[in-house]
Image (spheres, coloured by chain):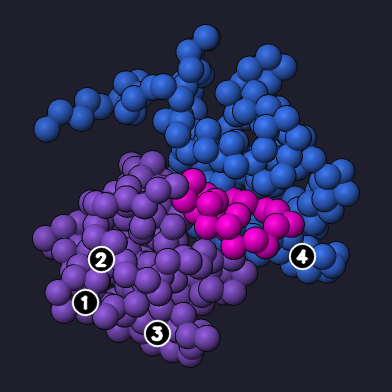
Amino acid sequence: MPLEVLVVEDSSGDIRLTREAFRDVNPFIHLEVAHDGVEAMAFLRRQGAYAGAARPDLILLDLNLPKMDGRQVLAMIKEDEALKTIPTVILTSSEAEADVLRSYQLQANCYLSKPMHFEAFHGLVKSINDFWLTKVKLPQQDDGDEPEPGAHAGHEQGPKKSRGTKGEQ
Amino acid sequence: MALDVLLIEDSPGDVRLTKEAFHVANDSVRLHVVTDGVDAMAFLNHEGAYADAPRPDLTLLDLNMPRMDGRQVLARIKNDDNLKTIPTVILTTSTADEDIVASYRLHANCYFSKPVQLEDFESLVKTINDFWLTVAKLPHETFDAAVVPRAGKSLSD
């Protein structure tokens, strides 16, 4: 089964590099791209044109984005009961300590800075693939439960009740 | 510069394997070991015998432990404004989907299940070392050198 990766990135050059690198290192990855934070949240919440969007196994999130920036997207993902379990890796040109610290405060799963050179970028994508998509145990959400129309997933409390067994103790 | 890794693990065999694997993978890692959740929180909060404990750059956390289990430790770390930025890797024998999902829900940075074979265990420690301590950017707390606030007292964001 292909793994779904959502890349949230506004730079067309970086999108192309990421695509090419993933194609080289793991042909079983299905890469989707959102070009700004608003599009990313619509994709993750399957709104509008994204009603049929797959739940990503991994999100690669740039920090500096138009419309809604990566910090806001990260905060929304990690406060949303339906989305918070998706590993979210910050991939940005920023090396500022404040950005690194803030991202971990907002519960980013990890922080990577984009290298300048093509070979190094390729190597980083390989590291992401080898670590996150090969070695790490990713959460398997039962994805049958579509977000309810009009419901704000971020305000849901606790696990969904559609699980097979009742967890009464 | 030496990196401090806190291993929270009650199995002496796994502690020994992890130590040996880090020794091979990266000799600049200082591995600190606590064997249950209560000691882990004391270490992280610099309490009692751990008054001089360093702030770990990375924490490896087992789930099933005596006294306070790994889920509780994880929840406490990730709800504490002072500690939540420490990358916390779950390293456990459990492969149960519910443990994996629950750990990510509590904001574990990532989840690994311990391999059974010795060589695979060594290789996993090398993978963790190479990614977290070489590739990833780790947070450097600016207030680390200052007096560390007591647990529960949150720093302003």
What chain is tagged by disc 3? B
Residue to which mark 3 is pinned:
B30
- Indicate the position of residue B15 as horizontal and vertical percent values: 29, 79
Name the residue type under label 2: Asn
Regarding mark 3 in the picture, which secondary structure is present there? strand
Q: Are marks 1 and 2 on the same chain?
A: yes
Disc number for residue B45: 2
Decide: marks 1, 2 in contact (CB < 8 A)? yes
- Indicate the position of residue A61 as horizontal and vertical percent values: 66, 45
Q: CA distance from mark 3 to mark 2?
A: 18 Å
What chain is tagged by disc 4? A
Question: Dot 2: within a 10 Å radius of its alpha carbon, few (fewer than 14), some, or many (20 or more) residues?
Answer: many
What chain is tagged by disc 2? B
Regarding mark 2 in the picture, which secondary structure is present there? loop
Decide: marks 4, 2 in contact (CB < 8 A)? no
What chain is tagged by disc 1? B
Q: CA distance from mark 1 to mark 4?
A: 38 Å
> Is residue B122 in view from this perspective?
no
Name the residue type under label 1: Tyr
Which quadrant of the figure has residue A35? top right
Regarding mark 4 in the picture, which secondary structure is present there? loop
**In this view of the protein, which residue sits in the foreground, A118 or A90?**
A90
